[in-house]
Image: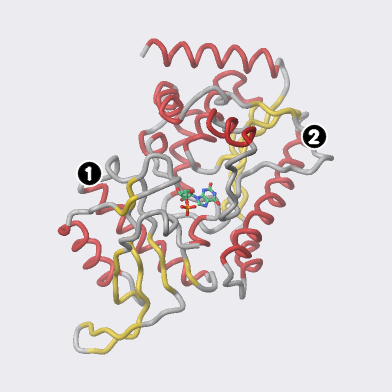
Amino acid sequence: NWTTASIVDEQVERIRAQIGDGHAICGLSGGVDSAVAAALVQRAIGDRLTCVFVDHGLLRAGERAQVERDFVAATGVKLVTVDASERFLSALAGVTDPEQKRKIIGREFIRVFEQAARDVKAAGDVEFLVQGTLYPDVVESGGGAGTSNIKSHHNVGGLPDDLQFTLVEPLRMLFKDEVRRVGLELGLPETIVHRQPFPGPGLGIRIIGEVTAERLEILRAADAIAREEMSAAELDSDIWQCPVVLLANVRSVGVQGDSRTYGHPVVLRPVSSEDAMTADWARLPYDVLERISTRITNEVADVNRVVLDVTSKPPGTIEWE
Ligand code: XMP
C-alpha cells in the first residue's frame, strides 16, 4: 500500500531526525499502539532502542509469549522483560475495591517501569522515551471538556521529574486503523495488529473479589477457552472485545457427574462498539455460546456456571470494575 509505505518512510525520517545517534526506551503493553510505535522506532534506530515489557502477572494466557517470541521475531527488537507478578500479587492481597485495585496496579506499574528505565538508562545513555500516543489521545487530553473520569485508566506516563526523557510519539498524527496498517506494513503479526482492546490492569479487574494466583489461573483458563472458540467461529472482527469475568466472591450449587458442586460463575461480556465510549452487548451465536459454556464447565475446575451479560453501555461499562 503506497500511502502506508510513505507514512512509514516519513515517520522513520522524523524519528531519525529527532533521536540522531541517541538512545531510546519504550514500554510494551502487549497492545497494538506500543507495538507499532516500537517497531517504527526500531526500524529507524535499530538496537539503540530498548523495549521494556512488565509482566504484572495479570496477563492472559499466551500474552507474554506473544511479545517475547512473536514481536521480537517480527522486529528483532532488543527486549527486557521484568517479571513482577509476585510484587503485584502481594500489593493486591486483601484488596477488593475496584478503584483501589486500579490505583495499586497503576502505581506498581509505574514503579517497576521506572526502575527498569533507570537500569536501562544507567547501562546506556538513554534520553528518549517512546510512547504510542494516537491522534485521538492528543485531541482528548488537550480538549479539557469532556474528559471523563468514571474509572481511573492506567497507562505508562507520569514518570518522575528526575527521570527526564524527551518524548518520541511517532503515532501522534494517526488514527487506529492507520496504526494497524502501519503495523502490517512493518511486518507485525496479525495477532498483534488486530488484537482486541485489553485493559492495562488486566485480569486484576476481571476478578470480582480479591485477586489471588489461584483465581488468576481459573480466569486465565476460562478466558483462553472463550477466545479460542470465538476465533474458531471467526467472530474476532465482529466483536469489539469479550471480557470474561470471574465472580470469585459468589458460589452457586451445581451437579457434575454424580456429585454436587459448589463453584464460581464466570460471566461472558461480548460487546460491539465503535470507540468503547458506548457499546451494545453482542449477539453471539447460540452454538458458540454453548461450546464456550460446555468447555469452560468441563475443563475449568471450580467453575460450574457460565452466564451472559446482556447490558449495553451505558448503563453498564464494558469492564465490570
Ligand atoms: P469501560 O469499562 O470503561 O472500558 O467501559 C472502556 C474500554 O477501555 C478499556 N479499559 C482500559 N484500558 N487501561 C486501559 O488501557 C485501563 O485502565 C482500562 N480500563 C478499561 C476496556 O477494556 C474497554 O475497551
- Name the element at disc 2: loop
- Could you classify mark 1 by the number of other residues whose Cα lies within 10 Å: few (under 14), some (14-19), or many (20 or more)? few
What amino acid type should be assigned to the residue bearing mark 2? Gln
Residue 187: give x, y in percent of width and height. Answer: 41, 25
Q: Are marks 1 and 2 in contact (CB under 8 Å)?
A: no
Q: Compared with residue 50, is residue 226 higher up or lower down, i.e. above or below?
A: below
Q: Nearer the viewer, residue 74 or 263?
A: 263
C-alpha separation, residue under disc 1 versus residue under disc 2: 45 Å
The quadrant where residue 44 appears: top right
Identify residue for label 1. 234
Q: Compared with residue 109, is residue 123 higher up or lower down, i.e. above or below?
A: above
In the rendered structure, the answer to whether residue 186 lies left or right of residue 99 reads left
What amino acid type should be assigned to the residue bearing mark 1? Glu
**Residue at 67%, 12% in the rendered image:** 17
Residue 179: give x, y in percent of width and height. Answer: 46, 27
Label placed on residue 164: 2
Residue 111: give x, y in percent of width and height. Answer: 72, 52
Residue 106: give x, y in percent of width and height. Answer: 64, 54
